[in-house]
Amino acid sequence: MIRKYQKSDLDALMQIWLEGNLDAHDFIDPSYWHDNYELVKKELPNAQLYVDEEEGEIAGFVGMQGDYIAGIFVKRDHRGPRYWRKAD
């Protein structure tokens, strides 16, 4: 289920953000992501955020700035072909 962000989602979104960046950017020192964690946590709610919730668990989120997709993050155990769905 796709829904709008709620303040109570922030910690889960930040964990997904951190894991996603560490996994996707192994050429960047991990300290960069850890050092910027609090800044992103402060700024992230300023974007239009939409959360994908599967069986009560946040599986991922997208951040929008107007019509621009600023970022898409998917929880590690929800990535890959087994989660791809055909459009109806």
Image (spheres, rainbow, N blue to C red):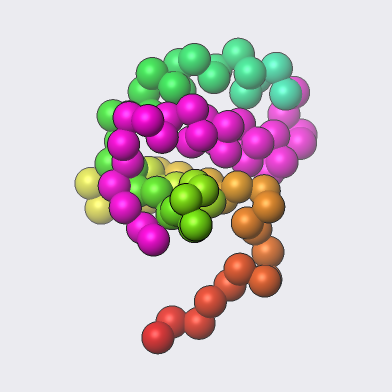
The N terminus lies in which quarter of the figure? bottom left
Q: Is residue 27 magenta?
A: yes
Task: Give the camera-side residue of 35 and 14.
Answer: 14
Q: Residue 76, image x and y in percent?
A: 67, 48
Q: Residue 55, image x and y in percent?
A: 50, 57
* Viewer can see residue 47: yes
| Residue depicted at x 40% and y 86% | 88
Does residue 84 sit above or below 86 in this rendering? above
In the drawing, does residue 81 fall left or right of residue 73? right
In the drawing, does residue 38 fall left or right of residue 21? left
Does residue 58 sit above or below 88 in this rendering? above
Asked which quadrant contains residue 49, the reply is top left
- Outermost residue on the front side: it is 56
> Total marks drawn?
0
In the drawing, does residue 32 fall left or right of residue 63? right
* Viewer can see residue 72: no
Q: Is residue 61 magenta?
A: no
| Residue depicted at x 60% and y 13% | 35
- Outermost residue on the left side: it is 66
| Residue depicted at x 72% and y 29% | 28
Does residue 4 sit above or below 79 in this rendering? above
Query: What range of the chain is rendered magenta?
Result: 1-29
Task: Give the camera-side residue of 47 and 27.
Answer: 47
| Residue depicted at x 65% and y 36% | 19
Q: Residue 72, image x and y in percent?
A: 48, 49
